[in-house]
Amino acid sequence: MSTTTTIPNCLYRAQDVRQGEQQLAAIYDIDLYQLMERAGKAVFELMLKSYPDAKQILVCCGSGNNGGDGYVVARLAQQYGLSVIVWEKECGHQTSDAARARQLWLATTGTTTLLAPQSIDKIDVIVDGLIGTGLSVTVNDEISQRILWINASQCPVIAIDVPSGLCADTGAILGVAVNAAMTVSFIGFKQGLATGQAAQYCGQRYFTDLEVGELFSPLVTASAWHIDATEITTLLPPRSRVAHKGDNGRVVCLGGDHGTFGAIRLCAEACCRTGAGLTAVITQADSALSIVTARPEIMALGWHDDTECLQQKLAWATVAVIGPGLGQSEWSQRLYLAASQNNLPCVVDADGLNLLATMPMVNSLRILTPHPGEAARLLNISIAEIEADRFAAVKLLQQSYGGVVILKGAGTIIYDGEHIFVCTAGNPGMATGGMGDVLSGIIAALIAQGLSLSQAARTGVWIHSKAADLCAQSGERGMLAADLFPFIRQLVNPR
């Protein structure tokens, strides 16, 4: 059974995978119990490979099909010679396949217990088959107590399909969740494993199609897609040998109020490092000289209230970035309003988003890049509501404001009004000031070089996150936004 850390591009809702399994059974006369056997075998083989010295395992089984997978793991482990404890919950409402797996476990002289094991120090590995992919409400008290016990044991945990307590569709924690060392997803990779709290609770993510992937994929439409790294090469081909700077677009970056001009400088340099032909900044008058001194390749213009001058610069530009370090002062609001009165493609970030929240308007030529706090302000809801269902939130943002929306965070989500893309690259070292400013500059430069809004959004997110992963090889803590520049340049020149 092939279990791999290579995660497929297609992502699915849990219900769609279940319906696909039913279609497989009906169309191809596939015995769903045999898929349960394959799933259990995949988990067992991964356990042996990952923990070859394990002597005693604890298998936690619920009443659903992933509980059935757990009984298969238990049976195979006992046959292999391991000591096995099966800790089950009341099984009065088991699925037929799970009941069959349980009976086969009992038929091999296996035993079960409803009580928590007492000799916790002798357990080497825990297999989590408590809940599975069907969870949509907060876990009940009994399951909650079991999950807390599992986490307190500090044993390595292998989660079957999804860590119990994590929603397979949203990546949100529904009460409390198992903190797994690894998670194995079957047949179709669940979209909730790619965003939200998944990175914290899934551990290393694995996938196996249980040998039915080629039959499954034509039957079920994916709900989302991982960003395809191979697409970057096709979107950023080698430049013409006779290219000049005018061929590579012109970006104007607007922002940098008093005390925050570093943000617009980072944004502008990211434009340059990503390959924009010409980059200009419109900022506070007393900041312009500092920006040019630090990076003379950037043209900087101090702005007071000269609307005609601003419009001339916007007419010159291929694309604009509005928001890095913009602030919310009277100067900020005047600049934002003046810059918004045009049909130029633009990337809106930071205080540009906060000002947009106070003056909502729809614009199909715009990319919004909110983090959850900014998204909450744009939708006038709480951050908790955003994080409860990031997929629903990004769709609502796009429906409310138009264009393309990038909802940042662990497992950044991009929605262009038609397709959802998820980026699982990136790391906690990115949680530092200026990272979002760099992302906005990358995206704007890609638009300037001819990519569509959707292409620029997903390509920019991937380059930004991948650059951070390359940078993190020297350590996550202490990473600065400007540290990404050498890696950005490397990634926009694929070989």
Image (cartoon, helix red, strand yellow):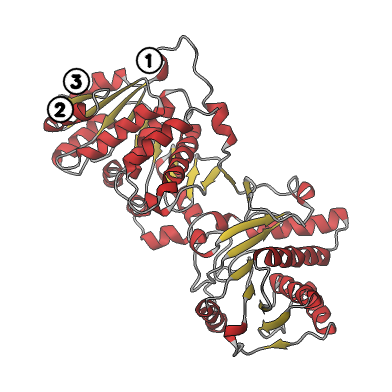
Q: Which image quadrant for residue 419?
A: top right
Residue nearer the viewer, 424 or 222: 424
Query: Disc 1 or 2, which lies upstream in sequence?
Result: 1
Q: Could you tell whether 120 is left or right of 462 in the image?
A: right
Residue extending farthest right: 29
Residue lying at 64% horizontally and 59% vertically, measured from the top left: 14
Q: Which image quadrant for residue 271?
A: top left
Question: What is the C-alpha distance between the residues marked 1 and 3?
Answer: 23 Å
Residue 100: in sight, yes or no?
yes
Q: Which mark is residue 145?
A: none
Q: Which mark is residue 245?
A: 1
Q: Position of residue 18 (x, y in %)?
A: 71, 60
Q: Position of residue 34 (x, y in %)?
A: 83, 64
Query: Disc 2 or 3, which lies upstream in sequence?
Result: 2
Residue annotated with mark 3: 309
Residue extending farthest front: 53
Residue 134: in sight, yes or no?
no
Amino acid type for the residue under numbered disc 2: Leu
Residue lying at 30% horizontally and 19% vertically, measured from the top left: 315
Q: Which mark is residue 289?
A: 2
Amino acid type for the residue under numbered disc 3: Cys
Residue nearer the viewer, 378 or 73: 73
Amino acid type for the residue under numbered disc 1: Lys
